[in-house]
Amino acid sequence: MKNLLVFQHIECEHPGALREYLSQDGVRVHTVNLNQGEAIAPLEDYDALWVMGGPMDVWDTEEHPWLVEEKKAIRRWVRELKKPYLGLCLGHQLLADALDGECDWQEVPEIGVLQVELTKQGIDDPIFQGMPRVQNCLQWHSVRVSKPPSDAVILASSPSCEIQAMRVGENAWSMQYHIEVEADTVDNWSKVPAYWNALINTIGIEGFKEMQKLANQNADEFSHTSKRLYNNFIRSM
């Protein structure tokens, strides 16, 4: 039986739809709620690490000092232990920042159901095996990876955010967008003040209604994407 370690930064940003697949496969999951002051478990005890999203930014170390230890753990996981890693949104940015990459503000925040396109390297990468070149996905971010780690390969892009997905080394993957979307994800996340304020300032209340509508319309595609990417990842464990 496999053991998965999850770094979580806010209660509502959990593995979402991916939890069902983990349960079906009998994967043991240990979640560390970093925002609640929980200590990081011994990394050697786990087969894979997932790092989820959150409203804080990678540089908010004074307000969230646990970010320092989290980045150390990510660095050790990827560089020393070299075990499978999956980062989503903040987890994507933390992967870059923990290594020798950089993050900064997105010129125009990406919030809504938007498209990303796989690069040639993405099409050939095991994590995207059997997936379409252009994918609809949920985006909700105001920060981007502006400089990838030196050994990163860019796997997906969008017109306003070049590094939508990347691989570092042979077994660390991350996405700026969300693959864990469930039926209530948009509604739940809209209750987080930082997310709501970014949304209203970027797309307004009518944009939010359209976002909810598109999320419902794309629910089947979201489900297919999450299942396929999960299956591709689990083979690396």
Image: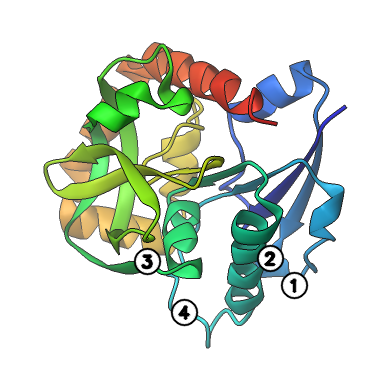
Q: Which is more N-terminal, label 3 or label 2?
A: 2
Q: Position of residue 129 (x, y in %)?
A: 43, 17
- The Cα atoms of the two marked residues, 2 and 3, are separated by 22 Å
Circle 1 crowding by C-alpha within 10 Å: few under 14, some 14–19, many from 20: few
Instruction: Please tell me whether mark 1 or mark 3 is closer to you in this view.
Output: 3
- Bin the neighbour count of mark 2 within 10 Å (Cα to Cα): few under 14, some 14-19, many 20 and up: many
The amino acid on which the numbered mark 1 sits, given as a three-letter code, is Gly
Q: Marks 1 and 4, Cα distance to the nearest angstrom? A: 15 Å
Number of the label disc, if any, that sits on residue 101: 3
- Structural crowding at the residue carrying mark 4, measured as other residues with C-alpha within 10 Å and reported as few (<14), some (14–19) or many (≥20): few
Answer left or right for 57 relative to 136.
Answer: right
Which amino acid type is shown beneath numbered disc 3? Gly
Q: Which residue is mark 2?
A: 34
Residue 116 spot, x, y in % from top left: 24, 32
Q: Residue at x 34, y 69 (%)?
A: 102
Q: Quadrant of residue 202?
A: bottom left
Do callouts 4 and 2 mark residues in contact (Cβ within 8 Å)?
A: no
Q: CA distance from mark 1 to mark 2?
A: 5 Å
Q: Secondary structure at mark 1?
A: loop
Residue 196: image x %, image y %? 34, 56
Mark before the other along the chain sequence, 1 or 3: 1
Q: Nearer the viewer, residue 3 or 124?
A: 124
Between the C-alphas of marks 4 and 2, the distance is: 14 Å
**Res. 112 image quadrant:** top left
Where does the N terminus fall, quadrant-wise? top right
For disc 1, the marked residue is 37
Q: Amino acid at mark 2?
A: Leu
Q: How is the image coloured?
A: rainbow
Amino acid type assigned to the residue bearing label 4 in the image: Asp
Secondary structure of the residue carrying numbered label 4: loop
Asked if marks 1 and 2 touch (Cβ < 8 Å), the reply is yes
